[in-house]
Image (tube, rainbow, N blue to C red):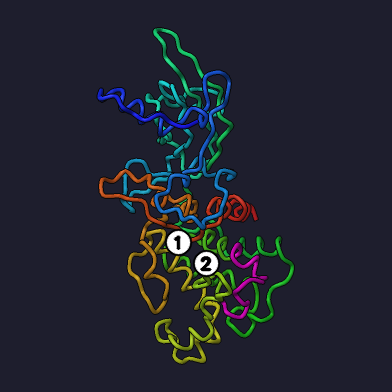
Amino acid sequence: MKNKKCTSPIPYLLISCLALMAFPLQAHASFSGKTIKLRSPYNDCMNRKSYDSYNYNNDSYDYLTPYDADTDKVTSRTGSSLTLHWYPVYGASGYQVLDSRGRVKKTISGMDVNQVTITGLSANKKYTFRVRAYKKKGKSITYSKKSRKASGRTGYLIKGKSTVSAAQMARYYKSKRSSYPSAYKSLGAATINDFTRIVYREASRYNIKAEVLFAQMMNETGFLRFGGDVSIYQCNFGGVGAVGNGAGGLDFRSYARAHYRAFGYSSASSAESHAISVGIRSQALHLSLYAGAQNHINNAIDPRGKYVRVGNAPYVQWLGIKDNPYTTGEKHSPSYRAQTRGWAAGNNYGYYLVEKYIMPMKKA
């Protein structure tokens, strides 16, 4: 259906016509029984490219995203808010957000509203919501059908004290893989227990949680199996510099030799024999910059740090580019405009780290 041109000089009618152009009738639920459609926040990203082929409408988590509604200050992150996203309904007077028990959590007036932030929630806790539209006519109110359920966890902070031990990480690894790479015996970590002790130490060095760092490493390497562009011998556990099309990224054996003084070693050969520590430390600093746990960019330790916008991903869930509110344009700042932020472009990247790695790790 083509939209009609607005010709009326009356401002009110002009606004109404513009609303019809922005929200054509066939794109939205009506009050005749259709259900409200939830939306991915990335659909509205200003910087989405034509070659970006991910189907974000099929994502399972990004309709409900962790969000700090009241502050842009890195030091004030609380992880106590979630933002729910949906497509507006033509003719609606407003919307209601319902909790898992069907109780009205929030009521928002206005037809063109397409998201709402629910505050005052508990940190690192899963919540489920639905949304429905309502229409007022005189004293009567009619409702659309409820949307499907949107479940999401409040933000999992990257910064802070680890909540798992080195032994827990090792047990978790062993539950997923029976062997450990023999190649690492000469590179500073003969066993998985040695490896996880290094992870814990380097995470503590940069004030980030070891479980987040380890989860990311296991996700990126397939529990140290590798198999992609990055070789197992590179000690590059975060795919640092591996930007696709066969690019293998940094080899931390040679990098350790070239920058041994920056890492505190007395010689190039000594640094290379601890290439695992060098690779983990570089990734830990890189992750801490995203989280805002560190704000000093040390190019010798983290050569990719210059590309990070410090503090733009305080939560694990925000490490996914399309799930980061700095990408999607949701930050409530007068000077703000949408940018591409986050560690990886994969669908549900940060959510996957939390649900498939971190939460099971805590039980190991």
Q: Quadrant of the C terminus?
A: bottom right
Residue 231 part of the magenta-drawn span: yes
Image location of residue 328, percent across then percent down: 42, 48
Q: Residues within 10 Å of mark 2 (few under 14, many from 20)?
A: many
Please rate how many residues cluster around mark 1, counting C-alpha atoms within 10 Å: few if below 14, some from 14 to 19, many from 20.
Answer: many
Q: Secondary structure at mark 1?
A: loop
Give the residue drawn at x 33%, y 53%: 75
What residue span does the magenta drawing correspond to?
Answer: 218-235
- Type of amino acid at the residue the image marks with label 1: Ile
| Residue most extreme to the top | 139
Q: Residue at x 50, y 45 (%)?
A: 124
Would you say 138 lies left or right of 317 here?
left
Q: Residue at x 39, y 70 (%)?
A: 305
In the image, 47 versus 276, the foreground residue is 47
- Where does residue 318 sit, x and y in percent of width and height? 46, 52
Q: Is residue 32 visible?
A: yes
Q: Is residue 335 left or right of residue 131?
A: left
Does 191 lie within the magenta span?
Answer: no
Q: Main secondary structure of the magenta part?
A: loop
Mark earlier in primary sequence (1, 2): 2
Residue 74 pos. (x, y %)? 34, 53
Q: Nearer the viewer, residue 175 or 87?
A: 87
Horizontal relation, residue 101 to residue 204: left or right:
right
Element class at badge 2? helix
Q: Quadrant of residue 148?
A: top right
Q: Is residue 265 above or below residue 307?
A: below
